[in-house]
């Protein structure tokens, strides 16, 4: 009697399938990809997951240093989306939709921790931070450590909304329209104005002394 051992998936085969998925969906609009996913297309689901998972993780980590909590929230989000296939509303901007969803999921989890530990609700607002990275557009040409440190100090003096808007615009490269939707602004110009004022304030905060 012959054994039938469980065959492990070939990593090269998985990579080929991933590349095939990219070729199929990379030229489709977000609306078309989402529609395919909502109809049960597993390749569309995998494309959405692989395309946005890293951005979602980085965005979620701007709300908390608890990376495990962020990972759990992402997992819960995609489990929910898979369960709701066939009932989901139309989406024309997948990244914006996922960002809004993970923001709600992370903040909901953080609020539970705040209540359980008896912390003030303002804790969540005041502790939204933006991590300075040499890879971001804002400091792409700022290689000196001193300038990077000054920029970080300047960012820490901005309001929560200003830091968040700059993060979404420069790090996540969202449009003014997407930022307005994510931050619940009634008009796109509100997002544009917030970013302009944040940049103006930041410029003054990091201006060398004596100038």
Image (cartoon, grey):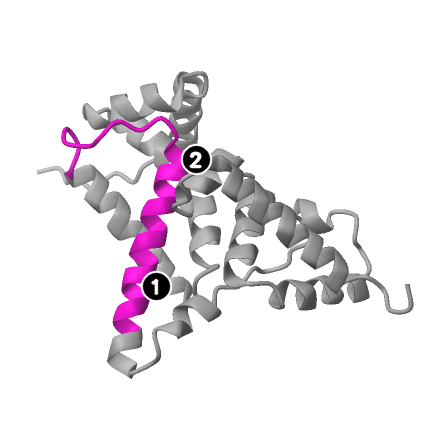
Q: Residues within 10 Å of mark 2 (few under 14, many from 20)?
A: some
Residue 121 in the image: state x and y as whole percent: 34, 73
Who is closer to the viewer here, 114 or 4? 114
* Disc on the earlier residue, 1 or 2: 2
Taking the spot 64% from the left edge, 46% from the top edge, the residue there is 196
Residue 179 in the image: state x and y as whole percent: 47, 41
Q: Is 95 one of the magenta-colored residues?
A: yes
Q: Is 34 one of the magenta-colored residues?
A: no
Q: Main secondary structure of the magenta part?
A: helix
Residue 25 in the image: state x and y as whole percent: 39, 20
Question: How many angstroms separate mark 1 from mark 2 (CA)?
Answer: 21 Å
The secondary element bearing badge 2 is classed as helix
Left or right: where 79 falls relative to 187: left
Q: Which residues are magenta?
A: 84-113
Q: List the single residue furthest toward the left.
A: 1
Left or right: where 5 falls relative to 134: left
164 over 79 or under it: above or below: below
- To which residue does mark 1 refer? 69
Who is closer to the viewer here, 128 or 86? 128
Left or right: where 208 falls relative to 198: right
Query: Can residue 10 be spotted in the picture?
Result: no
Who is closer to the viewer here, 211 or 60? 211
Quarter the C terminus occupies:
bottom right
Taking the spot 29% from the left edge, 82% from the top edge, the residue there is 117
The secondary element bearing badge 1 is classed as helix
Q: List the single residue furthest toward the right.
A: 210
54 over 202 or under it: above or below: above
- To which residue does mark 2 refer? 51
């Amino acid at each position: 009697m012959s054994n039938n051992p469980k065959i492990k998936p070939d990593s090269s085969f998985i990579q080929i399938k991933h590349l095939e998925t990219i070729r199929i969906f990379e030229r489709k609009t977000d609306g078309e990809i989402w529609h395919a996913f909502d109809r049960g297309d597993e390749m569309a689901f995998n494309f959405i997951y692989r395309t946005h998972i890293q951005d979602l993780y980085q965005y979620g980590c701007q709300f908390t240093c608890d990376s495990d909590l962020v990972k759990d929230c992402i997992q819960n989000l995609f489990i929910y989306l898979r369960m709701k296939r066939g009932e989901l509303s139309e989406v024309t901007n997948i990244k914006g939709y996922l960002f809004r969803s993970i923001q709600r999921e992370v903040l909901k989890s953080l609020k539970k921790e705040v209540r359980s530990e008896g912390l003030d609700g303002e804790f969540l607002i005041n502790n939204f931070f933006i991590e300075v990275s040499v890879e971001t557009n804002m400091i792409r040409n700022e290689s000196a450590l001193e300038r990077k440190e000054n920029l970080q100090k300047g960012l820490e003096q901005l309001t929560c909304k200003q830091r968040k808007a700059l993060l979404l615009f420069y790090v996540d490269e969202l449009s003014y329209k997407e930022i307005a939707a994510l931050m619940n602004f009634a008009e796109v110009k509100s997002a544009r104005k917030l970013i302009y004022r944040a940049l103006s304030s930041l410029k003054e905060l990091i201006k060398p002394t004596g100038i």
